[in-house]
Image (tube, grey):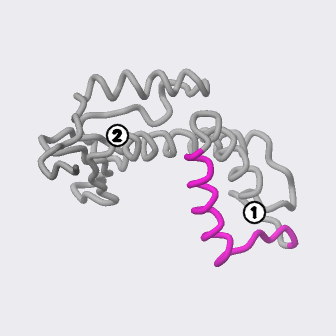
Amino acid sequence: MFNFFRRPKILTFEQIRAETDRLRALIGAPDNVCPLLSSSFGDGSPFLRVVADGYIYANEERGHVYNERKTQDLDELLYWIMKDITFSMAVDYEVANRVPKTDFRRMLFAKDLELLGSLKPEWRERKQREYDAVLAQYPFNDEIGYKVA
């Protein structure tokens, strides 16, 4: 029988930080890449607020909160946090290994999927669907190459 009054256990900020630190170690994420913050610095960095009925993961820049997401699902929250970390790592990897006259997203997306997939195969599949949606609208284009300042 389904219990409508059953709520998922909400972890503390410290417990979530411990879990993200564990996941970060698995992929060798440097401490300075998307650190988990409990409040905003106002610079656009993501931050996490733990509230009585779940988690709020958002960004704030110059007093404007954007990209605010709420959940009670720990796996969903960890996906949001870790996809920010793996994307940042993938950007750094692509910049260090850029292939001229090749759409930079090829290497960036592949590295991001590799990192997320090493944490949880379901996360890789989910991110692949997100990239597929982007590429359906904006396909890879190696012919023009991309000039990055």
Q: Is residue 122 above or below residue 147?
A: above
- Identify the residue under disc 2: 74
In the displayed structure, does residue 72 sit left or right of residue 117?
A: left
Which structural element holds mark 2?
helix
Label 1 packing within 10 angstroms: few (<14), some (14-19), many (20+): few
In the displayed structure, does residue 72 sit left or right of residue 93?
A: left
| Magenta segment includes 23 | no
Mark 1 and mark 2 in contact? Answer it, CB < 8 Å: no
Rendered location of residue 22, percent (x, y): 47, 21
In this picture, which residue range is highlighted in magenta? Answer: 122-143
In this view, the residue in front, 5 or 36, is 5
Residue shown at 85% from the left, 51% from the top? 99
In the displayed structure, does residue 148 sit left or right of residue 85?
A: right
Rendered location of residue 128, percent (x, y): 64, 57
Rendered location of residue 120, percent (x, y): 57, 38
The amino acid type, in three-letter code, at marker 1 is Lys
Residue shown at 70% from the left, 44% from the top? 111
Residue lying farthest to the front in this orientation: 1
- Identify the residue under disc 1: 147
- Residue 115, which numbered label? none
Which structural element holds mark 1?
loop
The amino acid type, in three-letter code, at marker 2 is Leu
Label 2 packing within 10 angstroms: few (<14), some (14-19), many (20+): some
